[in-house]
Every structure is written in C-alpha cells, then in structure tokens.
C-alpha cells in the first residue's frame, strides 16, 4: 500500500484519465447519463478524446434525450379547455361570404300561393325567403292590393327617405291599412353605411311579426342589398343560423346581393354571435 501511494502522484493527468476509462463498471450500476453518452458517441463515431471530455456532447445529448422523452410521454394533466385555447378560432370574413354568394344559384320559381300571372299584373318583385318572411322591392311595398292579397301585417322599410335610391313611404302611407305595422330605417345602399346598428332592432321587429302569426315584408329599393342584409341578420340572431347558412337559405329563394360593406358587417356579426354562444356554455 505504501508503494502504491508513492506511485500515484507521479502519474500524469492524461494517464490518470486513461486509467479511469479502463475501469469496468457493471451495466446495471452505470449511471443513465454515462450509458447515454457512450451509446451516442459510439453511434456518431466520436473519438475517445471527445468522450473523455464530454462537456459539449453531454449537454447536446441530454437535451435531445429530454425533449424526445417529453414528446413521447403524454401530459400529466388534461383540461377540456386546452384545445380551445391553443387552437385559433375560425373567423368569418366578408370575402368568404362573397364566395358563397357566387356559388349559390337561385332557381327561378313563382311565389308560393301566388300565380305568376297575377304577379306580372301587379308588377311586383317579392319572394318568401323564410316562412312568413318576404323580401321585396319598392313596388311590392307601394302596391296595397298586393299587400292585402299576400296578407302582409308588418312592413320594414330599410330605405326610408326621399333621396335617390330611397322609398318615401311611412306611417301615413299605410294609414288606410290599420292592420299594418310599419318601421323604417333611413339608409343608403353604400358600403360605408353602418347597417349593423339596425341588426337587433330589425330582428326584434321581424320576430314579433312572425310570432304574432303575421307576415313580414322587408323591402328597400330593389330588394337586393339593404333589405336582404336585415333579413339575414334576423336569421342569424333569432334563428341562430351562421352567416353562411343564412345566405344559402335566402339565396335558394331570392337572388340577393348585399354590397361588400354589408357582407363584412354580417361577418362581424357572425363572429360576435359565435363568441357569445361559445362562452355561454
């Protein structure tokens, strides 16, 4: 033992390192990190010097092994809200609604319970887009004979006014028809018009008319943009349809084409309603 103690200090540092590497350690007693380093160094063809000084390779290998182990194992906890928070919610855009309008084709068919010949005589352009909900033009709103034949009880004028492109009807125009309930919005058919401020008012008016057993006529000048937008808003708010489903429902019965600004406001309404219904549960 004394001779061994005198010889160890004389061994150089390099020889001492080689001596340690030659010591055999049973496989079951080896540390996990040492086994990992030896296997990776052998597979990558690392030299003995890089293994003897594994500071760089050890950090790289341990990080990779930890990430691989973390990816292979399932998370310790799970929340039913995890996927909803991580995945971005899909948003409806005005461009998407424009494509829906292009691809939905309106078939040509007469107004239900109304003969085409009579419609031609009265010179009206009106369609039932939903049970008891009609969209028409200015001639439909002004033709009192037509309104009586159709049994209209509520009229929503989305183009009230005397300017170009507006309809100058009002409460006085229907004073000889006491069963008519009238409401008017002074709007112009322009993309910059804020039609969204009338969405909930129009929806409430239409809902009251249909729930009371009546028939509602929503009209503007042509029955294409302003009136169609308010009717679509009603289907989205009261009937809980998405913007896409509402457009498809109306387009099957009438060729409506809201302008780009109105479509974008319908898309914003669709996103707002989706968020409210999503977090309501």
Image: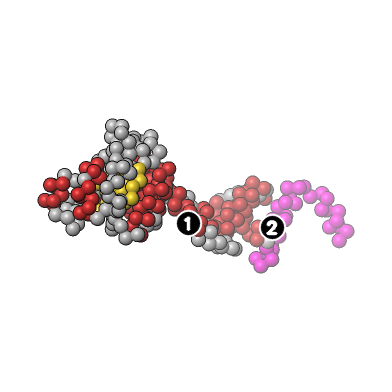
Residue 254 is situated, as x and y percent measured from the top left of the image, at 24, 49
Label 2 sits on a secondary structure element that is loop
* In magenta segment, residue 105: no
- For the question of whether residue 242 can be seen, the reply is no
Picture quadrant where residue 3 is located: bottom right
Q: Residue at x 64, y 49 (%)?
A: 59
Q: Residue at x 18, y 58 (%)?
A: 113
Q: Is residue 29 above or below residue 49?
A: below
- For the question of whether residue 154 can be seen, the reply is yes
In this picture, residue 33 sits left or right of residue 252: right
Q: Residue at x 25, y 45 (%)?
A: 141
Residue 151 is situated, as x and y percent measured from the top left of the image, at 24, 55
The magenta segment is 1-30
> Residue beneath label 1, please?
278
Question: Which is nearer the eye, 14 or 208?
Answer: 208
In this picture, residue 122 sits left or right of residue 216: left
Residue 69 is situated, as x and y percent measured from the top left of the image, at 57, 59
Label 1 sits on a secondary structure element that is helix
Q: Mark 1 near mark 2, Cβ–Cβ under 8 Å? A: no
Q: Residue at x 43, y 43 (%)?
A: 197
> Residue beneath label 2, please?
22
Sequence-first tag of 1 and 2? 2
């Amino acid at each position: 033992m004394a001779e061994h103690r005198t010889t160890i200090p004389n061994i150089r540092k390099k020889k001492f390192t080689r001596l340690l590497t030659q010591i055999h350690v049973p496989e079951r007693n080896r540390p996990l990190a040492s086994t990992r380093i030896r296997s990776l160094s052998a597979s990558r063809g690392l030299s003995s010097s890089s293994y003897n000084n594994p500071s760089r390779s050890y950090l790289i290998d341990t990080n990779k092994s930890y990430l691989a182990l973390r990816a292979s194992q399932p998370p310790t906890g799970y929340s039913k809200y995890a996927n909803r928070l991580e995945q971005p919610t899909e948003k409806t855009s005005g461009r998407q609604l424009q494509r829906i309008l292009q691809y939905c084709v309106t078939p040509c068919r007469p107004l239900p319970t109304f003969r085409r010949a009579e419609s031609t005589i009265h010179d009206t352009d009106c369609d039932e887009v939903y049970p008891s909900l009609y969209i028409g033009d200015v001639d439909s709103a002004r033709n009192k004979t037509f309104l009586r034949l159709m049994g209209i009880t509520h009229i929503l004028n989305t183009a009230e006014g005397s300017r170009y492109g507006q309809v100058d009807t009002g409460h006085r125009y229907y004073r000889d028809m006491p069963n008519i309930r009238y409401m008017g919005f002074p709007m112009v058919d322009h993309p910059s018009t804020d039609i969204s401020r009338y969405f909930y008012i129009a929806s409430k008016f239409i809902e009251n008319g249909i729930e009371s057993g009546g028939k509602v006529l929503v009209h503007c000048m042509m029955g294409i943009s302003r009136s169609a937008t308010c009717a679509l808003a009603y289907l989205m708010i009261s009937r809980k349809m998405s913007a896409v489903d509402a457009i498809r429902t109306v387009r099957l019965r009438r060729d409506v084409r809201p302008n780009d600004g109105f479509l974008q406001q319908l898309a914003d309404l669709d996103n707002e309603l989706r968020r409210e219904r999503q977090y309501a549960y």
